[in-house]
Amino acid sequence: METKKKEKVYPDHFIHSGEMNSKVGEKVKIIKINKESMELEDYFYLKKFENWIGTIIEQNHCNSGIDTYRVEFDQNKFGYFYDKDFVLRAGD
């Protein structure tokens, strides 16, 4: 029996980056971090950026096929994220 994958639902003003290609210059919001779904080192790195809004300023194509993104926030703060770590801000 085939089961359907449950689609995630996001508010209208967000577009999940896994559903479209993220591009340099786009505004993003770092999602709420789920501690149980990741290693502690990753959790504590991402937790400090939770719910922050920033701009993608760099996209790095990795040999693994998983891209990483440098996101810049206010006051010269930045972080590196996978597309699963943020949602795109539509209309900003």
Image: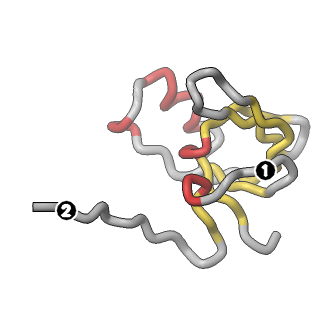
Residue tagged by mark 1?
Answer: 23
Res. 40 image quadrant:
top left
Residue occupying image coordinates x 59% and y 30%: 65
Residue occupying image coordinates x 45% and y 70%: 9
As drawn, the residue found furthest toward the front would be 1
Q: Badge 2: how crowded within 10 Å, few (<14), some, or many (20+)?
A: few
Q: Badge 1: how crowded within 10 Å, few (<14), some, or many (20+)?
A: some
User: Seen in the image, is 7 located left or right of residue 83?
Assistant: left
Looking at the figure, which quarter contains the N terminus?
bottom left
* Callout 2 amino acid: Thr
Looking at the figure, which quarter contains the C terminus?
bottom right
Task: Please tell me which residue lies in front, 14 or 3.
Answer: 3
Numbered label attached to residue 4: none
Q: CA distance from mark 1 to mark 2?
A: 32 Å
Q: Is residue 83 above or below residue 87?
A: above
Count of numbered circles in the view? 2
The spot of residue 15 in percent (x, y) is 62, 66
As drawn, the residue found furthest toward the right would be 76
Task: Please tell me which residue lies in front, 58 or 80.
Answer: 58
Residue tagged by mark 2?
Answer: 3
Answer with mark 1 or mark 2, whichever residue precedes in sequence. 2
The spot of residue 81 in percent (x, y) is 65, 36
Q: Is residue 53 above or below residue 33?
A: below
Q: Secondary structure at mark 2?
A: loop
* Callout 1 amino acid: Lys
The spot of residue 73 in percent (x, y) is 82, 44
Q: Which one is closest to the eye, mark 1 or mark 2?
A: 2
- Which color scheme is applied? secondary structure
